[in-house]
Image: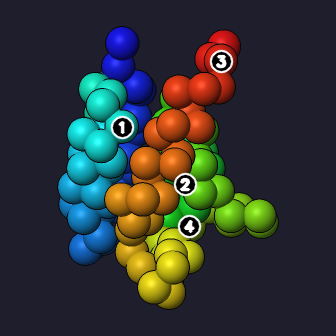
Amino acid sequence: MSTQVTIQYFDGCPSWTLALENLEAAAREVGVQLDVTEQLVETSEDAERLGFVGSPTILLGGTDPFAPSEPRPALACRLFETPRGPSGSPTVAQLVTALRSAQSTPSG
């Protein structure tokens, strides 16, 4: 069984490929296969319609495990709080935790 993942990004974001690399490393650690969809967000209107809160946004089964408490759709770079301070991507360890949580949550 594979985990459905959507990684949303915009063209000017330098961090979305790092987020994807970290996600793939986390999947190897957890032992899950990912079914990844890369979704390019091109306009502010797209960001609003999708609820896109910045690049990269990682959706596991349609849910953002790193959702901000007050989401504001924006065509902008996103920062994640990590043990080493703000970063353009969650750490592999944070993604391992998110993947394990997504696996234990019944879908639909």
Q: Amino acid at mark 3?
A: Pro
Which comes sooner in the sequence, label 2 or label 1? Answer: 1
User: Is residue 94 in view?
Assistant: yes
Q: Nearer the viewer, residue 49 or 103?
A: 103
> Is residue 85 placed above or below 24 in the rendered structure?
below
Position in image of residue 76 (x %, y %): 46, 73
**Rendered image quadrant of residue 53:** bottom right
For mark 3, what is the residue?
106
Q: Amino acid at mark 2?
A: Phe
Q: Amino acid at mark 4?
A: Ala
Helix, strand or loop at mark 4: loop
Please report contact status of discs 3 and 1: CB closer than 8 Å, yes or no.
no
Q: Amino acid at mark 1?
A: Val
User: Is residue 45 in view?
Assistant: no
For mark 1, what is the residue?
30
Please report contact status of discs 3 and 4: CB closer than 8 Å, yes or no.
no
For mark 4, what is the residue?
74
